[in-house]
């Protein structure tokens, strides 16, 4: 659900249209604005090939990096911005046995900051942590077990990533070259032209291929 709301806020190509907004109380969360009656008539829905086609066709100016403006945040309930001072902290997020790192230095444009080529991260640690589970560990003291990561979290105020504003949010050429070498460039295969129905034939792959080559 959180991932879906994240995508709707930032990608107009795949977001539904809210026909009748839900009634909102004073402490209504931002995500609640999608709770009203919606229609997906003009966007892909439940068909993977259509989603891939829409994402492939999406231009750089169609992604909303900062959907939550300063004015909007000021209007939200206080609990929504209670931890704003550590939103850019490089820290482990801990919930019982689960430990997941927050790496804001890899998505600085979401904070309106210039994005350099990020340094690599320790994925071996992630693999070891992901192998943990609560099965057979009833009564486990996870605070003690994860004491190393808890101490890391307690230093969160000292691990805030800094940066400088970038407006517009245009990356440097060397970042584009780096990104193209490590990413999946074609979400929709260039050779795929199978029609979904009588009204839509995915062509994002061919379009992207022709533009680049």
Image (cartoon, helix red, strand yellow):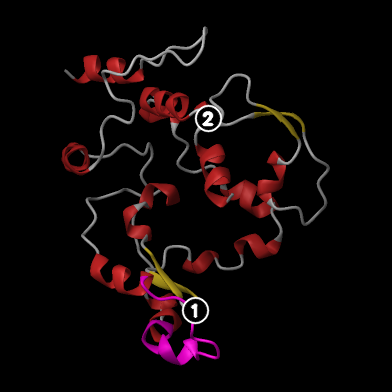
Res 167 → quadrant: top left
Element under label 2? helix
| Residue at figure coordinates x 48%, y 88% from the top left | 143
109 sits to left or right of 196: left
Identify which residue, 158 or 206, lies in the foreground. 206
Pointer 1 local density, CA inside 10 Å: few below 14, some 14–19, many at least 20: few
Residue 147 is covered by the magenta coloring: yes
Residue with the mark numbered 2: 14
Residue located beneath label 1 in the image: 134
**Quadrant of the rendered image containing residue 213:** top left
Residue 22, image x, y percentages? 80, 40
> Magenta residues?
131-150
> Could you say where residue 71 lies in the image, as x and y percent from the top left?
62, 47
Q: Is residue 63 magenta?
A: no
Position of residue 155 relative to residue 92, above or below, is below
Q: Is residue 73 visible?
A: yes
């Amino acid at each position: 659900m959180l991932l879906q709301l994240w995508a709707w806020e930032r990608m107009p190509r795949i977001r539904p249209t809210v026909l009748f907004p839900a009634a909102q109380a004073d402490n209504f969360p931002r995500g609640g604005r999608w709770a009203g009656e919606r229609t997906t008539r003009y966007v892909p829905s439940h068909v993977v090939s259509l989603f891939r086609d829409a994402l492939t066709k999406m231009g750089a100016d169609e992604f909303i990096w900062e959907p939550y403006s300063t004015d909007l945040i000021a209007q939200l309930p206080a609990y929504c911005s209670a931890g704003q001072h550590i939103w850019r902290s490089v820290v482990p997020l801990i919930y019982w046995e689960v430990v997941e790192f927050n790496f804001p230095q890899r998505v600085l444009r979401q904070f309106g900051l210039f994005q350099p080529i990020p340094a690599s991260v320790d994925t071996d640690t992630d693999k070891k942590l992901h192998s943990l589970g609560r099965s057979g560990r009833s009564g486990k003291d996870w605070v003690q077990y994860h004491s190393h990561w808890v101490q890391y979290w307690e230093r969160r105020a000292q691990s805030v990533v800094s940066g400088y504003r970038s407006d517009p949010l245009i990356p440097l050429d060397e970042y584009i070259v780096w990104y193209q070498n490590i990413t999946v460039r074609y979400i929709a295969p260039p050779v795929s032209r199978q029609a979904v129905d009588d009204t839509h034939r995915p062509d994002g792959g061919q379009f992207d291929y022709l533009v680049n080559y």
